[in-house]
Image (cartoon, rainbow, N blue to C red):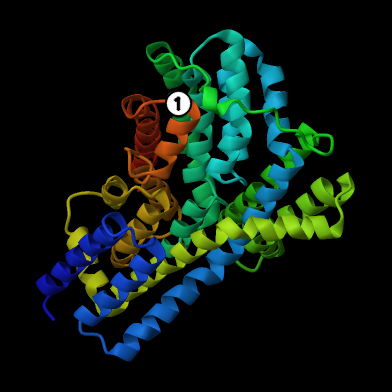
């Protein structure tokens, strides 16, 4: 089949995917599977090979993603139930004081969203925002935007959150580089989109706590855990994974130190250690029974299951593109572009994000489309970490009415659509643009 025909098939597949998700409201998991099957058939693959590609793509992706996302979900749920997020917020608020509470909220969101899903972290911490707004008379946005920025940055940029985990697996990036570049890009993004923009927009839009959101202060059945314990547990998997990545740079293959750090720093082992630490220090040691801990862990896997399946379907889409030959043609076309891979990754993710709303679907779709280019250009090492953050940045910008996060903020802050666009949408776009600019500049220096 000619290259131009394969390009038409790829374009039709993308439009069909967007149509199914946006217009028919078909679940992204089913839509990705259906489009993948149709791409394989349209490209002339034998039907048995289409099915083999589906199985290969799903199995290859879930072999990594399911383990990491599952462990991360249990880790985060234990932190949520124990009041660990609340402890982080209380301690940082006390250290920074009321005058610098925006910074405390931004840092709290940044730390909490590493193990805890974005919406869960927001719902847990939004009562603090309400309390500060009532006490000071300032707009909810003055305090809410920094918290949202911290949560959104980490949710998009730093594993073990599902988005960057999925993209890293699909394009073959080392998680250590993803974490390192995610932190480097995330800190300035959080500062500009959080405290700085929050202070500005809080003066422009005065918002009081909505009457329908009068919330009672959450009570925990046990004393809150210590700040040092929570911070240490959150950092354990990140440090282990980073040490693993750095050891591959410092030590030659076969060196005993490298072998040990490669094992304990693998995401499977690092997150297993972190999860067991949460079970013990936040569970057993604080009086939870074995059955209670098991119930908490089981409940954590419910929301993780959907994310895992969507990511697996993204792996199917990628595999069918490659096996059908469509991916090679796409890769050749993008390789002939004057735009660097980091820029292409950002633009593809941003286009899908604007069209259909879901950041996770935008990330896995963009990763599937950019993978053939990576193979053709022979990209590897740190640059793949930069491409992951570039995709995450593109999937963050311009959140609007087709994004569930838009309506979550709209409801909890009592905003109308216009003011949600002026606040939440602008904040998300700042995060995405700053993240992209940072990795683009780094990419210039590392080639």
Residue 36 pos. (x, y %): 31, 73
Q: Is residue 265 visible?
A: no
User: What residue is drawn where x is 46% and y is 68%?
Assistant: 312
Q: SS of the residue at dot 1?
A: loop
Viewer-proximal residue among 89 and 61: 89
Which residue position is annotated with label 1? 414
x and y percent of residue 30 in the render? 38, 68
Task: Residue at 52% x, 40% y: name it.
Answer: 154
**What is the quadrant of residue 214 in the picture?**
top right
For residue 18, above or below residue 281: below
Instruction: Name, please, the residue furthest toward the front.
Output: 212
Q: Position of residue 437 (x, y in %)?
A: 35, 36
At 70% across and 28% down in the image, what residue appears?
Answer: 217
Can residue 196 be seen by looking at this rendering? yes
Residue 70 is left or right of residue 403, and the answer is: right
Q: Quadrant of the N terminus?
A: bottom left
Position of residue 63 relative to residue 377, above or below, is below
């Amino acid at each position: 089949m000619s290259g131009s025909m394969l390009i038409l098939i790829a374009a039709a597949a993308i439009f069909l995917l967007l149509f199914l998700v946006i217009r028919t409201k078909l679940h992204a998991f089913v839509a990705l599977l259906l489009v993948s099957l149709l791409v394989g058939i349209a490209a002339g693959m034998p039907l048995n090979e289409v099915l083999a590609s589906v199985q290969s793509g799903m199995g290859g992706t879930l072999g990594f993603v399911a383990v990491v996302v599952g462990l991360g979900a249990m880790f985060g749920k234990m932190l949520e139930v124990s009041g660990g997020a609340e402890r982080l917020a209380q301690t940082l608020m006390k250290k920074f004081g009321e005058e610098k509470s925006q910074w405390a909220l931004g840092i709290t969101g940044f730390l909490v969203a590493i193990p805890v899903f974005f919406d869960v972290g927001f719902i847990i911490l939004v009562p603090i925002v309400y309390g500060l707004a009532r006490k000071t008379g300032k707009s909810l946005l003055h305090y809410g935007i920094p918290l949202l920025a911290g949560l959104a940055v980490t949710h998009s940029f730093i594993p073990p959150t599902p988005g960057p985990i999925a993209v890293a697996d699909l394009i073959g990036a080392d998680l250590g580089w993803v974490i390192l570049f995610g932190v480097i890009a995330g800190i300035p993004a959080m500062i500009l989109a959080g405290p700085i923009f929050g202070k500005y927009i809080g003066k422009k839009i005065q918002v009081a706590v909505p009457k329908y959101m009068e919330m009672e202060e959450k009570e925990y059945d046990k004393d809150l855990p210590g700040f040092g314990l929570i911070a240490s547990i959150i950092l354990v998997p990140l440090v282990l994974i980073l040490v693993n990545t750095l050891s591959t740079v410092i030590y030659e293959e076969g060196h005993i130190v490298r072998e040990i750090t490669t094992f304990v720093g693998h995401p499977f082992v690092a997150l297993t250690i972190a999860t067991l630490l949460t079970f013990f220090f936040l569970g057993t040691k604080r009086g939870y029974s074995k059955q209670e801990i098991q119930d908490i862990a089981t409940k954590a896997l419910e929301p993780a299951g959907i994310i895992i399946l969507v990511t697996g379907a993204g792996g199917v889409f990628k595999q069918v593109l490659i096996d059908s030959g469509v991916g090679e043609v796409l890769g050749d076309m993008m390789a002939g572009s004057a735009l660097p891979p980091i820029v292409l990754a950002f633009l593809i993710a941003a286009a899908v994000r604007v069209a259909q709303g879901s950041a996770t679907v935008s990330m896995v779709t963009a990763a599937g489309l950019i993978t053939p280019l990576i193979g053709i250009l022979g990209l590897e090492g740190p640059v793949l970490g930069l491409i992951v953050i570039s995709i995450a940045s593109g999937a963050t910008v311009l959140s609007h009415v087709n994004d569930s996060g838009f309506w979550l903020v709209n409801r909890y802050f009592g905003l109308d659509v216009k003011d949600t666009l002026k606040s939440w949408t602008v904040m998300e776009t700042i995060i995405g643009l700053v993240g992209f600019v940072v990795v683009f500049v780094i990419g210039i220096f590392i080639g």
